[in-house]
Amino acid sequence: MSGPKRNPDRLNTIGIVVVGICGAVLVYVTIVALEAFYVNDTSEIQTMADYGGQDTSAKSLRAEQLSRINEYATNPKPAAPKANEAAKPQTYRVPIDVAITHVLKEAKVDPSSLIPQVGRSDKNTVLPIFGRPKIIPPPPAAPPPPPAAAAATPGAPGATAGSGAGSAAVLPSAPQVPTGAGPGSAKGNGK
């Protein structure tokens, strides 16, 4: 064995580790890119397979409603009245744009009678405050009338003390405020 002395054979550990990590990263990136391409390519097909066009009925209903709200037409005829009821008149519908202008004109004239079937709306039922509606409390009861003048005269019969005159006077009732407890609840029956 002649010749120059060779370096001993050693494994290049750093190079193998670097090549292994780079290979793993490259494989991972390739798999993610292929999945993204595949999902993008088949997403519409998958959506149809999953949901089967469930939105078609909603789309057709919306199209029908839009066509109905933008046309002049006759509403369905009311049912025949019962024996003690008056006959209801035939009603018609107009496009929404015409209805809006008509309601605005009527609101400028008299805003309390916008719904003809209901009548005038001139009494408040809830307090005009922000938040959950609160019912307007009823007005306080009128004070009881004063006793009759005949009972107040000293010589009148039955005007003696303790005779019971005036015991039938109407007392004002206590205000009744709903507590939210219905019949049979633990809060309402004292349990």
Image (cartoon, rainbow, N blue to C red):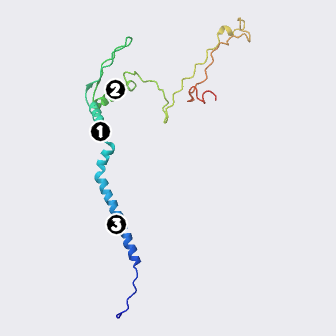
Q: Position of residue 84 (x, y in %)?
A: 39, 11
Outermost residue, bottom side: 2
On residue 56, the disc is: 1
How many C-alpha atoms fall within 10 Å of the one at disc 2: few (<14), some, or many (≥20)?
some
Q: Position of residue 26 (x, y in %)?
A: 34, 66
Q: Nearer the viewer, mark 1 or mark 3?
A: 3
Measuring 25% from the left and 29% from the top, which residue is drawn there? 71
On residue 168, the disc is: none
Task: Tell me the quarter of the picture where residue 139 sits.
Answer: top right
104 and 191: which one is in front? 191
CB-based contact (under 8 Å), mark 2 and mark 1: no
What amino acid is found at the position of numbered circle 1 in the picture?
Thr
Measuring 34% from the left and 63% from the top, which residue is drawn there? 29
122 and 150: which one is in front? 122
What amino acid is found at the position of numbered circle 2 in the picture?
Glu
- How many angstroms separate mark 2 from mark 1 (CA)? 39 Å
On residue 26, the disc is: 3
